[in-house]
Image (cartoon, helix red, strand yellow):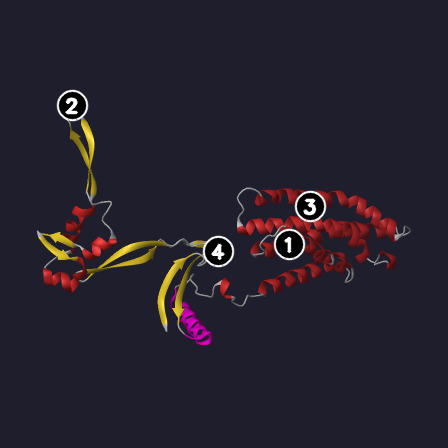
Amino acid sequence: RVRNTRISGGDRFWRTTDRMEYYMDFDSRSMALYNIFIDDYYYGLREKIAQSNISSVFDGSTNVPARLVSDRHESYTAWHLENEPVIIRGMPYKTANMMTLDKRLIGNDIYKYNQQYRLTMSFDFLGPHVPMQRLRDRLIDEMNDEMPLGYKAGLRKWEWAPQEKEQYYLILLVIVIIYFVCAILLESLMQPLAVIGLIPISFIGLFLTFYLFDINFDQGGLASFILLSGLVVNAGLYILNDFNNFRKRDSKLSLLRIYVKAFNNKIIPVMLTISSTVLGLIPFVTGKKEAFWFAFASGAMGGLVFSLVAIFVFFPLFLKMGNGR
């Protein structure tokens, strides 16, 4: 049921340029019967298609560069090669008796994806889809058992392989770690929730950036989640730390005035941190757009800009200032 097995480079349907070549497969038994060597055949073929340079020819006054070209060099085709006899040692021999001429793919373009170089192996399967899947999965397991360290066989993305979701659990783990660190720093279990609440708000800006500018979401987008989580929490901690310090020293002031004082005291460092980070990421979105870094920088910039909305509008609400927390 399996036929036409082939190996190609890059993506099978849209990035691979197929290049073909003619391949002569000699029949060693037939050539031995005629007492002909491959060198003899190539020598007889060279008279029909050869072109070579001669160093120079003296024309009586100067040396002129010269080149020898067969008169059939332009007109001799693959059909002539298969059907016309070739003169070898003065005797005509028909090519079909000694070799076969086939056309095959050459020059695979190997592309880099996700920090890995990959090749595509494909084949035609005659039959239903279910036995084809079984055969494919068995072949993948056998190849992985034999491949050396650093090589791996797997399904291509366009075959709708099940996508791993461990990276999303890692983002949740990062948020949990940030919560416990903030709880230790602030000596509170409720205030870190206000800081953590800034993270999903900044993620809204990240998603809007990928949607509005039609950017492909890949590993760079996942990495921007981690960067946003740290930077947005950092901005919230700046303000909240001063809020707690001012609250201890000026207990007679209302919570609103204390928050406004802490906000005014730290908003300039927060703005400088966000703006410097956004400016530092601009080179990744201009010029040559690398897949990972372009998505990473775009998502981080959009999330950081939208985090200003979270800090100015939502952060005081998350603190529940009217209740003192």
Disc on res. 61: 2
Disc on res. 274: 3
Q: Residues within 10 Å of mark 4 (few under 14, many from 20)?
A: few
User: Which is nearer the eye, 247 or 98?
Assistant: 98
Earlier-in-chain disc, 4 versus 2: 2
Q: Secondary structure at mark 2?
A: loop
Residue 244 falls inside the magenta stretch: no
Earlier-in-chain disc, 1 versus 4: 4
Percent x, y of residue 125 = 40, 71
Mark nearer the viewer, 4 or 2? 2
Mark nearer the viewer, 1 or 4? 1
Q: Residues within 10 Å of mark 2 (few under 14, many from 20)?
A: few
Q: Answer yes or no: do the residues labelled 4 and 2 have beta carbons within 8 Å?
A: no
As shown in the figure, which amino acid type bears the numbered disc 4? Tyr
Specify the farthest residue to the left: 90
Mark nearer the viewer, 2 or 1? 2
Tell me how far mark 2 sits from mark 1, CA to CA.
75 Å
Specify the farthest residue to the right: 252
Point 68% across, 59% down: residue: 178
Q: Answer yes or no: do the residues labelled 4 and 3 have beta carbons within 8 Å?
A: no
Percent x, y of residue 26 = 20, 60
Q: Secondary structure at mark 4?
A: strand
Q: Which residue is mark 4?
A: 113
Disc on res. 211: 1
Q: Which residues are magenta?
A: 127-147
Tell me how far mark 4 sits from mark 3, CA to CA.
31 Å
Earlier-in-chain disc, 4 versus 3: 4
As shown in the figure, which amino acid type bears the numbered disc 1? Tyr
User: Which is nearer the eye, 165 or 16?
Assistant: 16
Tell me how far mark 2 sits from mark 3, CA to CA.
78 Å
- Is residue 287 found left or right of 136 in the rendered image? right
